[in-house]
Image (cartoon, rainbow, N blue to C red):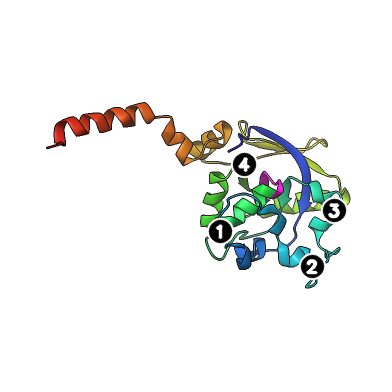
Amino acid sequence: MKALKTHTGTVMPLDRANIDTDAIIPKQFLKRIEKSGYGQYLFYDWRFKDGGEENNDFVLNQQPYRDATVMLTRDNFGCGSSREHAPWSIEDYGFRIIIAPSFADIFYNNCFKNGILPIRLPKEDVQELFDKAAADSKYELTVDLEGQEIHDSQGMKKAFDVDEYRKHMLLEGMDEISATVQHVKQIDEFERQHRLHYTL
């Protein structure tokens, strides 16, 4: 998992509330066994028409948002089923930051496990960011995870909260498996001692 310390990227304004995981990645793409390659299916039913042609009205199909890495959206993002494929597709497409007033709990947790920083801000702050993005299609934000601050080139600064353990994991680029591997010597020694005392 890639570490996330400071990130600057173009903001994609996705002005919808209650976006569920089936909209993020439809169920027909969940049969793949790989963990990568899901970015092409992100928001598939919104990005493409029935014949496979791009829907030019959808924000992600417009420039400069095709290359955006910061997603700005509304309440309850990631609701619905608990599929981990949703953050997989978001990260694989290239988004590292999602900003919203609120997230579904399971989706929120899964983001941290997959190298994405979900940031909760008050509704009025999110609206301010939407206004700035509407005024400038190339609007960029810089996110400083260590300092827990968002800022832009216009002097705007906003602080955000994040759990210290999750923050540490993102800063170090670790998931639960890589964190466990750090203690492999202690685990091996425990198992060795266990075998010595309990093997008949």
Asked whether 171 falls inside the magenta stretch, the response is no
Q: Which residue is mark 3?
A: 134
Which amino acid type is shown beneath numbered disc 2?
Answer: Gly
Asked whether residue 102 is in view, the answer is no
What segment carries the magenta color? 93-100
- What is the secondary structure assignment of the residue under circle 3? helix
Mark 2 or mark 4: which is in front?
2
Mark 3 or mark 2: which is in front?
2
Mark 1 or mark 3: which is in front?
1
- Which quadrant would the N terminus be assigned to in this image? top right
Task: Check if mark 1's residue and mark 3's residue have beta carbons within 8 Å.
Answer: no
Q: Residue at x 15, y 32 (%)?
A: 197
Q: Which residue is mark 1?
A: 104
Sequence-first disc among 3 and 4? 3
Local crowd size for mark 4, using a 10 Å CA cut-off: few (<14), some (14–19), many (≥20): some
Which amino acid type is shown beneath numbered disc 4?
Answer: Phe
- What is the secondary structure assignment of the residue under circle 1? loop
Q: Residue at x 15, y 36 (%)?
A: 198
Q: Which residue is mark 4?
A: 160
Where does residue 78 sit, x and y in percent of width and height? 60, 59
Q: Is residue 5 left or right of residue 81?
A: right
Mark 2 or mark 1: which is in front?
2
Where does residue 61 sit, x and y in percent of width and height? 82, 57
- What is the secondary structure assignment of the residue under circle 2? loop
Q: Which residue is mark 2?
A: 52
Local crowd size for mark 2, using a 10 Å CA cut-off: few (<14), some (14–19), many (≥20): few
Sequence-first disc among 3 and 2? 2
Q: Quadrant of residue 184?
A: top left
